[in-house]
């Protein structure tokens, strides 16, 4: 799954990476949590013929997906992630998979390795980021929920997939990362049906991410400083490609 993530680059870097029309200023965020606003990117209106201007647009949504048919949000679970394997057919995500696919910029995410009961001990938090640095774009879905009084809330979720072997040493799921060359196809909900983008919903390559053990300060939403990214132990190396043993170090 993906329960916390980081976006600590400038608006200009995000706009350049995702080819956006423009982007308002925002602060670096080191502990983005469910129910908080998250930045998403959507495909905008078709540009005029011959125009080279980008048509992607950024907007803020609440991290916690709410299908349009929900009547009482208090009685509906908070959907921060959507399983890519079942999102096409699941009632909660079916319409968004067809009509409202988005990109969610990030610079990394947190995951926790939870020891087996017989091992004892506390969960270890890891900051997982691209080995080469820079920005990544999670595959996401959005939905606008309307209440009985007519008010609306834009909501979103991150698509996840089975973890590759490296990440599986920590957790069995990981966010789906869309490569820049596939941005247009993922966002194109007019000509690309869900079955046409199934090939994009896969785990990143084994050596794409590095996994950095960090302190338990990330467990508290109130902690939001850059110190959350400081290593507390040796960085977890990628799993050897011929390795069949799962070990932490």
Image: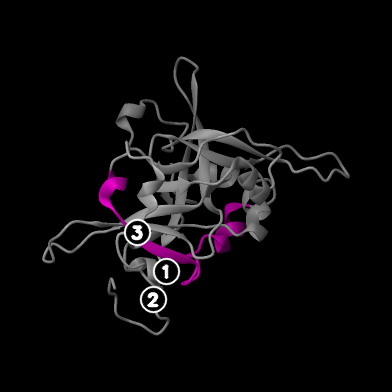
Can you say whether 215 is above or below 149 in the image?
A: below
Q: Residue at x 43, y 65 (%)?
A: 210
Q: SS at mark 3?
A: loop
Q: Quadrant of residue 10?
A: top right
- Taking the magenta stretch, the answer to whether it contains residue 136 is no
Q: Which badge, 1 or 3, comes first in the chain's sequence?
A: 1
Where is residue 120? Give x, y as percent. 12, 62
Where is residue 41? Give x, y as percent. 60, 42
Tally of numbered discs: 3
Give the Cα separation between the discs numbered 3 and 2. 19 Å
Name the residue tied to disc 1.
Answer: 164
Can you say whether 218 is above or below 132 in the image?
A: above
Give the Cα separation between the discs numbered 1 and 3. 22 Å
Name the residue tied to disc 2.
Answer: 239
Confirm or deny contact between disc 1 and disc 2 (CB under 8 A): yes
Magenta residues span: 193-219
Q: Is 56 in front, or is 99?
A: 56
In which quadrant of the rendered image does the C terminus lie? bottom left
Name the residue tied to disc 3.
Answer: 231
Q: Say whether residue 2 is visible.
A: no
Where is residue 215? Give x, y as percent. 28, 53
Q: Is 246 in front, or is 145?
A: 246
Q: Which badge, 1 or 2, comes first in the chain's sequence?
A: 1
Can you say whether 68 is above or below 33 in the image?
A: above
Give the Cα separation between the discs numbered 1 and 2. 9 Å
Q: Is 1 in front, or is 86?
A: 1
């Amino acid at each position: 799954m993906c329960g916390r993530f980081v976006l600590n680059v400038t608006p200009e870097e995000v706009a350049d990476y995702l080819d956006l029309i423009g982007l308002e200023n925002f602060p670096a965020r080191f502990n983005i949590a469910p129910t908080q606003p998250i930045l998403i990117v959507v495909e905008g209106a078709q540009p005029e013929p011959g125009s080279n201007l980008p048509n992607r647009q950024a907007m803020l949504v609440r991290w916690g997906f709410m299908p349009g048919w929900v009547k009482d949000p208090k009685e509906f679970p908070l959907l921060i992630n959507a399983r890519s394997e079942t999102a096409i057919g699941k009632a909660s995500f079916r319409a968004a998979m067809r009509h409202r696919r988005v990109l969610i910029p990030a610079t990394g995410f947190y995951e926790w390795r939870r020891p087996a009961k017989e091992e004892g001990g506390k969960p270890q938090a890891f900051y997982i980021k691209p080995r080469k640095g820079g920005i990544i774009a999670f595959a996401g879905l959005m939905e606008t929920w309307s209440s009985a009084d007519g008010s609306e809330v834009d909501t979103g979720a991150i698509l996840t997939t089975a973890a590759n072997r490296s990440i599986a040493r920590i957790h069995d799921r990981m966010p789906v990362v869309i490569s820049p060359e596939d941005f247009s196809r993922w966002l194109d909900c007019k000509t690309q049906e869900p079955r046409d983008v199934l090939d994009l919903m896969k785990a990143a390559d084994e050596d794409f991410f590095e996994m950095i053990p960090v302190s338990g300060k990330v467990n508290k939403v109130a902690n939001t400083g850059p110190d959350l990214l400081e290593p507390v132990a040796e960085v977890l190396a990628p799993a050897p490609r011929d390795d069949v043993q799962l070990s932490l170090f």
